Image (cartoon, rainbow, N blue to C red):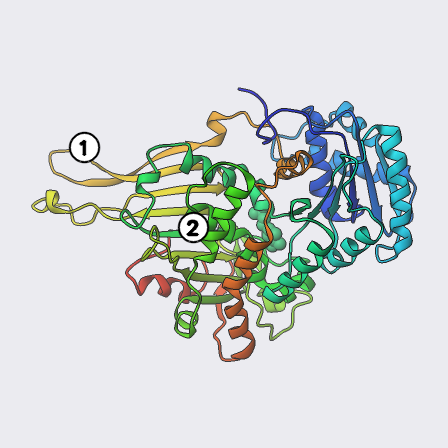
Amino acid sequence: MAESVGTRNATQAPPCTVVIFGATGDLTARLLMPAIYNLSRTGLLSQNFALVGLGRTQQSDDAFRQSQTDAMKRFVASGDHGGTPNPLDEKAWDFIASRTSYMSGDLADAATYQELSKKLDQISAKNGTKGNVLFYLAVAAQMFGPIIDQLGAAGLAEEKDGYWRRVIIEKPFGTDLDSAKALNTRVLKVLNENQVYRMDHFLGKETVQNIMALRFANGIFEPLWNRDHIDHVQITVAETVSVEHRAAFYEQTGAMRDMVPNHVFQLVSLTAMEPPNSFDPDAVRTEKSKALQAIEPFDDDALRRNVVRGQYAGGTVRGEAVPAYRNAEGVAPDSMTETFVAMRLNIDTWRWAGVPFYLRTGKSMGRRTTQIAIQFKGAPLALFRDTAVDNISPNVLVLQIQPDEGVSLQFSAKRPGPEIHLGGVKMDFRYKDYFNAAPATGYETLVYDCMVGDPTLFQRADSVEAGWSVVQPIFDMWKNDRSAPLEFYPAGSAGPEGSDQMLWRSGRAWRSLD
Ligand code: BG6
């Protein structure tokens, strides 16, 4: 079994310089540098590679390299890269460190970009990076527009003489439909769509990518994947973490903006999309967008019946007492921010008409689990009419995204014995039993894909806007109707009662989080 870091082929990335805006931040040290290190460890970086960290802090190249080396040691020692703790691979890290420099500057000042331009020319001449540059915006969202304007003004976004310029933009891409549209317009004034890589880190997860493999590389699932056989779909993204030290961000954001139009909708679109004509990036992204565009818009009735928002009250999560959200530091005592949201979507296509998609996501819930459960329609009961069988558990295909990554199929089997009694059993596939995957943060694939110019796993402008369009009526309702309910749920539970009732109304129930 070959070791892999999640990149789909093992050819080396082309020469390039990676410029990280926000180089002294948490994201860089915790995810980005470790991903680049993992690419180096597995030989996927070009020998002609260079990295420039850009930040406001004044410091020397050496000081920046040292801080990143310290962070990297903590990272590999902690096993946070997804594997067992192991020592730093000095050779792989030195390769990066020796090609890393730092530049301080005001990101809103044109002079910074003039200096960066000169620096990139020097690096290209020295390191043979051929003028290719990947700009990574690991900065606060309000800086995305200004940085891209400045890249354009300084000529840094221009592709000529055979070299490429690409920009990875982190989440959040807008805070609602209008702001996302405005940002797309601003970005696309400077860059062509094929230079823009809008990040959703869920797409870096192996198990999320596996949804397409499961559906389209196997003959047995697709014939069942429709309204004739599927009763409903449940998508759960439950987290045990509370708001912790992120109150300032979370108060402005809430569970809906933070998770739904981006991460949760990735899962919806990959589950609901039609098979693409090919694995060409645009063929795939077009089908994903179409799935989101087919979501039935929420009207007043659907807003009342099919959307539930919740906020955690005090409780216990994994044995630890968790204070109510409203008592967390930095949270307003009468905060209406939702830490949980559940909704029912209808997807208006021939494949999905009449098949509800139920979604829920929340913080401080009883268990951390991200899963897609496809619940199939029941079998005809005739065969068991005169037996003791009164209840047949449904067939459920569960794509377990994290943790315990895998796929399981639940079905009924006869219990041994003279009478017909059925029991629910499971066929279980666990990734770790089959594949010897190397430790990875999930960012490796995405950074590598950008280097090789494959945008399949990045969001196109239309799908970002399609996602915001679906949830915009919900934001409008919460803003305009102060009486729109906010339900409380004990920390450590599966969410508020209204979320259960939404399914009970149609004779269904959420799967247990355990
Ligand atoms: C982030 C959200 O985008 O995704 C966080 O801002 C959330 O609130 C996180 O916890 C979840 O990602 P993961 O990879 O930990 O499941």
Judged from the image, the secondary structure of the residue bearing numbered disc 2 is: loop
Q: Residues within 10 Å of mark 2 (few under 14, many from 20)?
A: some
Query: In this orientation, does residue 514 appear?
Result: no
Residue 12, percent across and down?
68, 25
Question: How far is mark 1 from mark 2, CA to CA?
Answer: 29 Å
Question: Which residue occupies the foreground of this view, 14 or 204?
Answer: 14
Question: Under 8 Å from ligand 1: the CB of mark 1?
Answer: no
Mark nearer the N terminus (1 vs 2): 1
Under mark 2, the amino acid is Leu
For disc 1, the neighbor class at 10 Å (few under 14, some 14 to 19, many from 20) is: few
The residue where tag 1 is placed is 416
In the image, 175 versus 368, the foreground residue is: 175
**From the viewer's perspective, is 353 left or right of 9?**
left
Determine the image quadrant of residue 52.
top right
Which residue is rendered at x = 34% and y = 50% of the image? 351
Q: Residue at x 37, y 64 (%)?
A: 502
The residue that mark 2 highlights is 513
Could you say which disc has been placed on residue 136 in the image? none
Q: Nearer the viewer, residue 513 or 16?
A: 16
Residue kind at label 1, given as amino acid type: Pro
Provide the secondary structure element on which disc 1 rests. Answer: loop
Left or right of 408 in this view: 105? right
Q: Position of residue 207 (x, y in %)?
A: 50, 38
Quadrant of residue 449 in the image? top right
Residue 299 position, x and y percent, is 42, 71
Residue at x 44%, y 56% (from the top left corner)? 359
